[in-house]
Amino acid sequence: MKRPMEKTGDVTALGAMSGTSLDGVDAAVVITDGHRINGFGATSYRAYDKDEQTVLRAGLGHWSGSAVDAATDVVEQAHLALLESFDAIDLVGFHGQTLAHAPRTRGTLQVGDGAWLAQALDTPVVWDFRSADVDLGGEGAPLAPFFHFACAHHIGATEPLAFLNLGGVGNLTYVDPALDRPEDPGALLAFDTGPANAPLNDLLQHRLGLAYDEGGKIARRGTVEQGALELFLAEPYFARIPPKSLDRNDFSEMVALVGELSDADAAATLTAMCAAGVAEGMRHCPQPPARILVTGGGRHNPVLMQMLAVSLDCPVGPVEDVGLDGDMLEAQAFAYLAVRVARGLPTSCPGTTGVRAAVGGGTLSWPQATDIAV
């Protein structure tokens, strides 16, 4: 197999993403030279079953031990089962599963051995995307902004715009497409806006055995508790200047704030907290974006989308409005980033993670070969 880093043209890369919502693994193919997006390929999804989700939840917040080992096994086997169904792939971008994220203290932990996966797939794998960024003083997240920059050019954007990912945690990428490279000063600003779906999903799982609020049906019946919302917005995180990032459970006390509310009122309040965090974050943008394109599971919640439309001063819509796939955008991002890592290009910069200088972090593992830290 010819090594992707030796090619001068396009690479057919397969990216995989298992997010903080813990619903399953997304996989998607991107054809790219590491700069431009020159095509999208096949996509697929493998859901975690209830037992697997239980194992993954048990590992959250842990840095080592039996719970982490069990979660690692679930992540590796789920990814292998999904990724081996793809053909004619040059390179795989494997994010793994984030169990703990504390860049200012302990670091960041994404479980899953990319070297093992490279052997199992007989395909080179780029993995451990975040560690180098954290080692250089960055937040290690979010990492999709360099791909968002490429997407903005791919759709022909001419004015600043924002990508808003609403997974377990919310994150915003402000893009100025007038710049040539994502690492150019002013091209990108990115940060986590606050919790998104994770607290609501956890609440509904605990109370009703539901994975999420399908169609916003539960929140639609409720009333937002303004006192709890005000306490949420008083959190010091919102006053911090970006770049900044969160662990999935950093706002776990949100559930306590709505603990005495009915199911509907609690769902409405947690949904409003997500939207309010985004509205607070918009104050950090250099100028109001021309539009906000929403990706991730949150865009399927009409109550949340309506709250965003009311609270933001620019048009808000799903990324499908510009021909992108909001279910697969993060998996596509790690396909794209894998090519950049393999070719020695940066994947984060001061404007996206607060890292001291633009860095291309990751480990490239070859079948039957030594890992190469890039």
Image (cartoon, grey):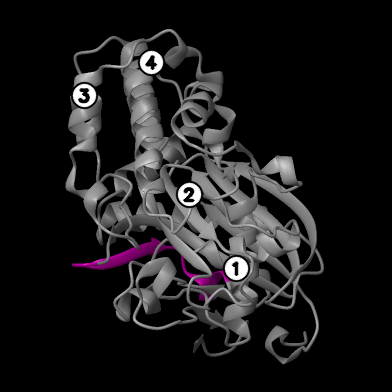
Closer to us: mark 3 or mark 4?
3
Regarding residue 79, the answer to whether it shows in the image is no
Q: Is residue 129 above or below residue 326?
A: below
In the drawing, does residue 95 fall left or right of residue 329?
left
The crowd level at tag 4 (other Cα within 10 Å; few <14, some 14-19, many 20+) is few
Q: Which residues are magenta?
A: 104-117
From the image, tell me which residue sits under label 2. 19
Examine the rendered structure and indicate whether residue 156 appears above or below residue 356: above
Q: Secondary structure at mark 1?
A: strand
Residue indicated by mark 4? 208
**Considering only order in the chain, which callout, 2 or 3, is on the residue closer to the N terminus?**
2
Residue farthest front in this picture: 287
In space, the residues marked 3 and 4 are separated at their CA atoms by 21 Å
Q: Earlier in the sequence, mark 2 or mark 4?
A: 2
Mark 4 is on which residue type? Leu
State the SS at label 4.
Answer: helix
Residue 12 is tagged as none
Query: Which residue is rendered at x = 66% and y = 66% of the image?
Result: 150
- Asked whether the viewer can see residue 16, the reply is yes
User: Percent x, y for residue 48?
Assistant: 53, 40
Q: Which residue is mark 3?
A: 228
Instruction: Tell me, yes or no, whether the highlighted magenta stretch contains residue 112.
Output: yes
Q: Residue at label 1?
A: 93
Q: Nearer the viewer, mark 3 or mark 2?
A: 3
